Image (cartoon, grey):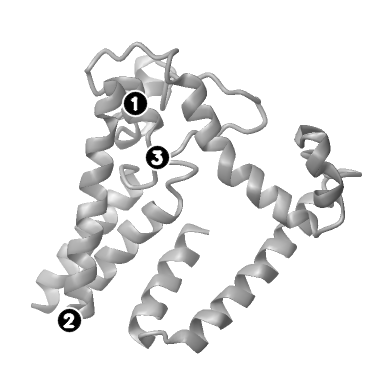
Amino acid sequence: MVMGVQSLCVVMLLSRSGILSMWKYAILAIFVIIGFGYFGDLRQTYNPFIPLVNDEWRSFFENIPSGFLWVYIYFTSGYNNLIFNVDLINPTYFPYYSLAKLVPSVVYNLLGVTKTLDGFEFVNENLNVSTIYASFYSDFGILAFFPVFFIQGLAVYFYKRAWRGDFFSLLKYSIVFQAIIFSPFIDTFFYLPFIVQFLFIKYLKYKTG
């Protein structure tokens, strides 16, 4: 899914999509949502999220494709977990969780330490996403917003350079773009594979320079 979003970002910028193209993407998104719910429902005999819906909305969600409920639950559960943990977290102001994604799991295994990406408790154990803020908030509390501002700033910077025709900025923007797209669920920016992508782009620029 991450590679798909990065590829979509490149295609959209290179094609300089107009209104008609945006309608095509919207229609594609609807089909993806419906398919997401269909394949999710195949894993059980009914939609597992229906019991979580308030009675006043249950009939509505029972009469539309289940994918819309799946997407809604997945999209909002991260924020729900974040809000739930606001008063539970006592930040240490040390980047223990924030840097954990940059350390290979094999290092933790050698040290005999369990790799933990945040200190959150989940409202529902089946919905274990906590937005891009989870690890930063676990370490720094309200100051967690600053690393995310940094990511958003990079997105603006690379987007402007990519729009002017800088191919390598386009590749870098696709990395930041997918981090923002998946920010309601998880932090994909500070994972080691994505940091390595930046290094690979730099190496590619050097070799073609």
Write down the residue under mark 1.
137
The residue that appears at 77% across and 37% down in the rendered structure is 53
Q: Nearer the viewer, residue 207 or 170?
A: 170
Task: Estimate how packed mark 3 is, as few (under 14), some (14 to 19) or many (20 or more) residues with alpha carbons within 10 Å.
Answer: many
Q: Residue 159 vs residue 82: left or right?
A: left
Q: Residue at x 28, y 42 (%)?
A: 148
How far is mark 1 from mark 2, CA to CA? 35 Å
User: How far is mark 2 from mark 3, CA to CA?
Assistant: 29 Å
Q: Residue at x 48, y 26 (%)?
A: 83
Q: Which residue is mark 3?
A: 132
Task: Estimate how packed mark 1 is, as few (under 14), some (14 to 19) or many (20 or more) residues with alpha carbons within 10 Å.
Answer: many
Q: Amino acid at mark 2?
A: Arg
Residue at mark 2: 164
**Quarter of the C terminus within the rendering:** bottom left
In space, the residues marked 3 and 1 are separated at their CA atoms by: 9 Å
Establish if 106 lies above or below 29. above
Above or below: residue 68 compared with residue 79 = below
